[in-house]
Amino acid sequence: MATVYVGHDLKLNRVIALKVMHPHLAQDDEFVRRFMGEAKSAAALSHPNVVAVYDQGTHGAHTYLTMEYLPGRTLRDLLDERGRLPAGDALEIMAPVLAALGAAHRAGLIHRDIKPENVLLSVDGQVKVADFGLARAETDSKQTKTGMIIGTVAYMAPEQVVTGRSDTRTDVYAAGILLFELLTGRQPHVGETPLQVAWRHVNEQIPLPSQLVPGIPPRIDALVISATSKDPAGRPADADHFHALLTDASLELPAAPAAPPSPDNATSVLGVPGLPGPGGSLPDVAPDGRTSVLPSVHPTLPPGGHTGGHPGGHTTVMPRAMVPDEPPREQVMLFDRILHFITGKFVLVTLGVIASMVIGWATWYQVSGKYDHVPKVIGLSQADAVEALRAEGITYAIADEKEYSETARKGTVAEVSPGVGSKVDPGETVTLVLSQGLTPRKIPDVTGQTAEQARATLKDFVTLTEEKKPGAAAEGMALGTNPKAGTEHARDEPVVLLISSGLAMPNLSGKSKEEAYAQLETLKGQLNGDLPIYEQTQTDPAKENGAILWQNPAPGTLLKPGDAVTLGVNKKEDCFLSAINPFCDDGPDDKGNVKVPLVLGRAVDDAVKKLQERGLQVDVQHRVNSGRVIDQQPGGGQRVPPGSTVTVYD
């Protein structure tokens, strides 16, 4: 698309990247528009993970952008160097990529070309998404230029391949492929030609990353499979949703080993703060339970003091006031008896409580405790349902077949077996059946209803949108639906209600005069009788007598009361008015000669057919190669013997 140079901004004295479109592409107005669209799209995104665009312009035949210069390399360079990344590193890179896409999606933009080459890694650790040149405002046309698919085939969503349509979920698909490649070091679909790769995106399921790299957590497997669902409805709705699921999935990764404690805040080998490690010393404890540091002194006994041994060879001196007096012997004996009685009762009560707890636990375990219970997963997305089952430690599987449902939207869980709340033995597999959509119903006919009545009639179709167009009904009246009435249609698949923006002039060309007047009389009634009709006659020998040759206003023109309609009506001359009338065939004369038809202005093939129907030979001569007869010999209306040659010139 362009060549990128390192440049210098003379005004602001900074290094910039200068992106100059290739000259042969500058000839294509559509490509220039998309190139300039890159500047407008990206400049509107002020986000730390989006490469900034400063300016755009032209210089002579050159079209250019000035952009943020980012020293470093691409994510493709990193993958070429390392092959694949550990799961933690892969998620760490994907998070800012999805943050950038999320900002674009919130602004109504889609990128359409997410791949490692468009993810830049700066030397200071920044991750930025570049090349919004293929982005398009989400509200613009969803269809690309006829015959053109924009994007890189290895990261292209199935709907891009089949229909060329793009939305936020096509970016999610490409980001899912990118995550797969970071985790495994390869793209999920390869082939000898781009067409083979595209075919596999449409028809083959992405493999689980853990099948290629053992040890990847199931939560990350589920995240990749959800993001790369062939059905867009089964993917996260946009990059922000994908980012939230990615953040949750990162919790499945093993925690990094804890750093050793610093000497200033050491924890003992027993794991209790404040206790010494090997070689440490315990603090002394005063009789009232408070910790105190008592000095060691020489073995000198002060008057009234007591001595005690000290490991250091010194004598610890304690004031007598800190040593309690011994109680009388009788008090000690009474205290021992009371303590013995209380202790015995306590032991019996404790044993009884423990026995009751053991019996209760055993009963609970046999009745319920050894089972898991299926959580409420009906209506959840596949990723959320899998997360709920994993949180309960339940093994799960996804059924191959999908089912229609009365309540579960397309891509969510429609059924679970065993059912919600059921007991599940350890190791038993719970099967999730995904919804193919809300149960189909026939689309009712709303033609002729008011818009409000039509909306009420179609209330069961939950993705109803409206489109205004001219039609054979007054403004605000329903013209019908797309798909048409009577079609069996899933209730969460899109249905378009067609609303009349006003009465439109029908196409009357080729109809008989009677048919044309019947249609116009209907329109006249809808316009309260205010629709004057005029005729002009002319002759076209190729059309039936009374056929409508042209009309004014043109088909599709909105009509309003007082508008006049003029019809061009074909009127052939009667054969008896002229013996040489070239517009009618009155058969051979009394000598057997036939009349040469007038074919001037006809297409050459049509003229040859008309002459041959009269039993005449035809010689076509080319003068200007116009494709239509500009002259003929003999002329129209002359009589010649059957089998004569008529020369026509085009």
Image (cartoon, rainbow, N blue to C red):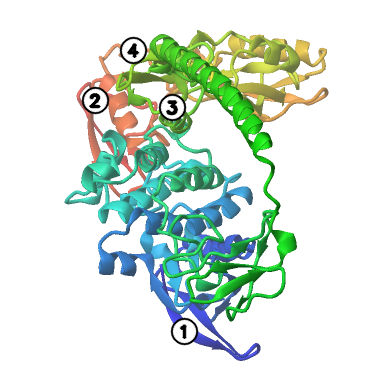
Disc 2 crowd rating (10 Å Cα; few below 14, some 14-19, many 20+) is many
- Ranked by sequence position, the earlier of labels 2 and 4 is 4
Q: CA distance from mark 2 to mark 4?
A: 13 Å
Task: Kindly identify which numbered label has been placed on residue 616.
Answer: 2
Closest to the camera, between mark 2 and mark 4, is: 2
- Of residues 447 and 329, the one drawn nearer to the viewer in this rendering: 329
For the residues labelled 1 and 2, say whether their Cβ atoms are less than 8 Å apart. Answer: no
Circle 2 sits in a helix, a strand or a loop, which is it?
loop
Residue holding disc 4 = 587
* Image: 516 above or below 232: above
Q: CA distance from mark 4 to mark 1?
A: 85 Å
* Image: 568 above or below 279: above
- Quarter of the picture containing the N terminus is bottom left
Task: Kindly identify which numbered label has been placed on residue 6.
Answer: 1
- Ranked by sequence position, the earlier of labels 4 and 1 is 1
Query: What's the residue type where badge 4 is placed?
Result: Gly
Residue 202 falls left or right of residue 451: left
- Ranked by sequence position, the earlier of labels 2 and 3 is 3
Q: CA distance from mark 4 to mark 3?
A: 94 Å
Residue holding disc 3 = 392
Q: CA distance from mark 3 to mark 1?
A: 55 Å
Disc 1 crowd rating (10 Å Cα; few below 14, some 14-19, many 20+) is few
Residue 264 falls left or right of residue 147: right
Query: What's the residue type where badge 2 is placed?
Result: Leu
Closest to the camera, between mark 3 and mark 1, is: 3
Percent coordinates x, y for residue 101 in the rendering: 53, 53
Percent coordinates x, y for residue 46 in the rendering: 64, 64
Percent coordinates x, y for residue 349 in the rendering: 55, 18
Closest to the camera, between mark 2 and mark 3, is: 3
